[in-house]
Amino acid sequence: MIVRIMGEGQVKLDDAHFIELNKLDDELLDEMESGDEAGFRRTLGALLDSVRRLGTPLPDDALEPSELILPSPDASLEEVREMLSDDGLIPG
């Protein structure tokens, strides 16, 4: 799957990694619902770090359609809330 982190670029991520990412996504959703800003920041950073670590960066000139778009590391709680689906940021 091609994943874009807003403001950073795209990575190719194997579907097998989504189990780990969905755990972080669930945690992020819980922190957003409870208004835990510090927890939200920590978990958003961990989620994006995991995508960077597990994924293979695509060249800057690659024009692949992104199947998943994640917020930038400095996105506000409200900005991320607007990006959520029923499943959170990551489907599944």
Image: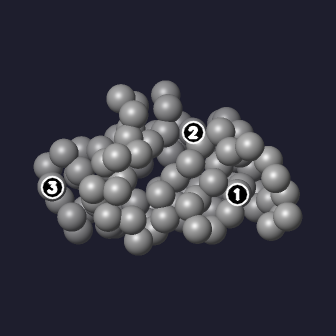
SS assignment at label 3: loop
Q: Is residue 24 above or below residue 10?
A: above
Say which of 81 and 27 sits in front.
81
| Residue found at x 63% / y 68% | 8
Q: As drawn, is 1 to the left or to the right of 48?
A: right
User: Where is mark 1, residue-wise?
Assistant: 10
Q: Is residue 28 above or below residue 46?
A: above
Question: How crowded is the residue under tag 2: few (<14 C-alpha within 10 Å), some, or many (20+)?
Answer: some
Say which of 84 and 87 sits in front.
84
SS assignment at label 1: strand
Question: Residue 73's image quarter?
Answer: bottom left
| Residue found at x 58% / y 68% | 7
Residue 73 visible in the current orientation: yes
SS assignment at label 2: helix
User: Where is mark 3, residue-wise?
Assistant: 35
Which of disc 1 and disc 3 is earlier in sequence?
A: 1
| Residue found at x 56% / y 61% | 6
- Gap between marks 2 and 1, in whole Å? 16 Å
- Gap between marks 3 and 1, in whole Å? 29 Å
Which of disc 2 and disc 3 is earlier in sequence?
A: 2
Dot 1 amino acid type = Gln
Q: Which mark is residue 18?
A: 2
Question: How crowded is the residue under tag 1: few (<14 C-alpha within 10 Å), some, or many (20+)?
Answer: many
Q: As drawn, is 30 to the left or to the right of 25?
A: left
Check if mark 2's residue and mark 1's residue have beta carbons within 8 Å. Answer: no
- Gap between marks 3 and 2, in whole Å? 25 Å
Check if mark 3's residue and mark 1's residue have beta carbons within 8 Å. Answer: no
Q: Residue 9 at what x, y percent from top left? A: 68, 63
Q: Is label 3 or label 2 in front? A: 3
Which of disc 1 and disc 2 is earlier in sequence?
A: 1
Dot 3 amino acid type = Gly
Dot 2 amino acid type = Phe
